[in-house]
Structure formats: C-alpha cells, structure tokens
Amino acid sequence: MIKSLVNFAILYDTFLILIALLLSSIIGWEREKRHKPAGLRTHVLVCISACALVIITKNHIPNDYARIIQGIITGVGFIGAGSIIAQRKQVVGITTAASILFVAVLGIVIGLGEILLATFLTILSFLILRYLRLLEKRISKE
C-alpha cells in the first residue's frame, strides 16, 4: 500500500514537471519566434526548475514555501536583468524579462498543483505577448 502511494506521488510529480514543460514551451515558442534574447530553452528551463524546487520543498520541507519562492524570484531577477539591453536611446528586452519572471511564477503555480490556474495564466500570457503588441502599435500611431 505504501509503495503504491509512493509510486503515485512520483508519477504525480513527474506529471507536474511535464505540464510545466508543456505550458512554458508555449511562452518560450512565442519568444523564440520573435527572435528574442531568451527563447524556448530558457523559458522551459526556468519553469521546470521553479516547479521542481517547489515539488522538492513540498515533499521534504513542507513548511518552507515562502523561502523557496523568494529564492526563485531573486534568481530569476538576475536572468531577467541579463535579457535587458540598452541600445542607443532605448531599452529592449523588458518584455522578455517579464516573460522569464512569468514562467518562473508559472512553475511555482504548477509545483503547487494549481494546473487549471496555470493553464489559464499561460493562455492569458500568450494572448498578451501575441496580440497586445498590435494594440500598442495602433495606439502609438494615433
């Protein structure tokens, strides 16, 4: 009985990691398609890393979520800062930095088992990255 519970837990954790891979791939693919500094691999690695850290915390240090989440966000801040570049009189890469932060949060949400919320957030984020740009261009023309 205990062995089957352990096997289920391992399968569930693996399932969560695969969901993190799938959902972050959607965001990473969008960034990759636009030839941004951080693309598919970066987004997937950030998301599954955050997810794995939350799963490990959940399984081994269940009362320490806040510290792990703070550490994830701090570490991702450094990655995001590296994607922001000043070019001439403008700064580029801020949206990519925000998308990296997003997939880290996505990994946290998935690691906590909130798959429906994670799916909704991914769809929302993809729509923002893909279509809000068109609205921005229309507004700037006016």
Image (cartoon, grey):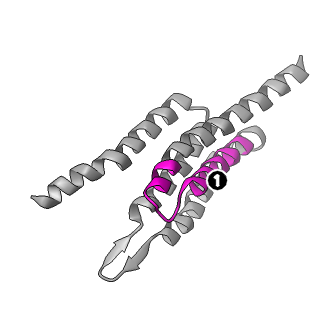
At label 1, the amino acid type is Leu
Does the stretch in magenta take in 37?
yes
Nearer to the camera, 112 or 123: 123
Residue 25 locus on image (x, y percent): 56, 45
> Is 28 placed above or below 78 here?
above
Does the stretch in magenta take in 72?
no
Residue at the image position 60 percent from the left and 63 percent from the top: 75
- Residue 64 in sight here: no
Q: Quadrant of the N terminus?
A: top right
Residue 96 falls left or right of residue 3: left
Q: Residues within 10 Å of mark 1 (few under 14, many from 20)?
A: many
For disc 1, the marked residue is 45
Stretch of the chain drawn in magenta = 28-56
> Which quadrant of the figure has residue 94?
bottom left
Residue at the image position 35 percent from the left and 74 percent from the top: 91
Nearer to the camera, 53 or 121: 121
